[in-house]
Amino acid sequence: MSLLPLPLILTSPANAATYLDGINAYRTGDIKIAISIWTPLGKKGHLKSQIGLGKLYLRGTGGKPDLGSIFTFSFPG
């Protein structure tokens, strides 16, 4: 039996973080993790992730408000 190389295992869809993982991180107060989960999803067009990021950036949650990021994720394309 051949084993997959480690990078392929770590990046497989089964191990990919989901929108709900971001929600759970947000609810437990780990805003940086929520942002790190939602950013790649938002860049791929996931609407709920884009909305979540827009709200975080608007409120300045995890830092000061970032108007550029608000427009990037709230009005993609």
Image (cartoon, helix red, strand yellow):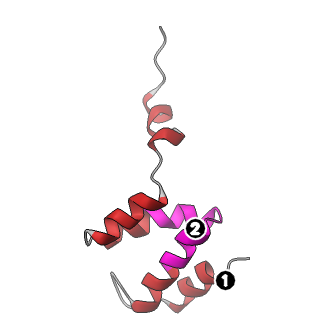
Q: Could one spot residue 7 in this view of the protein?
A: yes
Residue range of the region highlighted in magenta in the rendering: 37-53
For badge 1, the amino acid type reads Phe
Residue 26: x and y, percent? 34, 71
Position of residue 5 in the picture relative to residue 72 (left or right): left
- Determine the residue located farthest toward the right in the rendered image: 77
Residue 23: x and y, percent? 39, 66
Residue 69: x and y, percent? 54, 83
At a point 32% along the width and 65% down the height, the residue shown is: 25
Is 43 contained in the magenta span?
Answer: yes
Place residue 64 in its image quadrant. bottom left
Task: Give the residue number, with chain letter if any, for mark 1.
Answer: 75
Label 2 and label 1: CA atoms lie apart by 11 Å
Dot 1 lies on which element?
A: loop
What number is the disc on residue 33?
none
For badge 2, the amino acid type reads Gly
- The relative height of residue 49 versus residue 51 in the rendered view (above or below) is above
Task: Give the residue number, with chain letter if any, for mark 2.
Answer: 42
- The relative height of residue 75 versus residue 20 in the rendered view (above or below) is below
Q: Disc 2 vs disc 1: Cβ atoms closer than 8 Å?
A: no
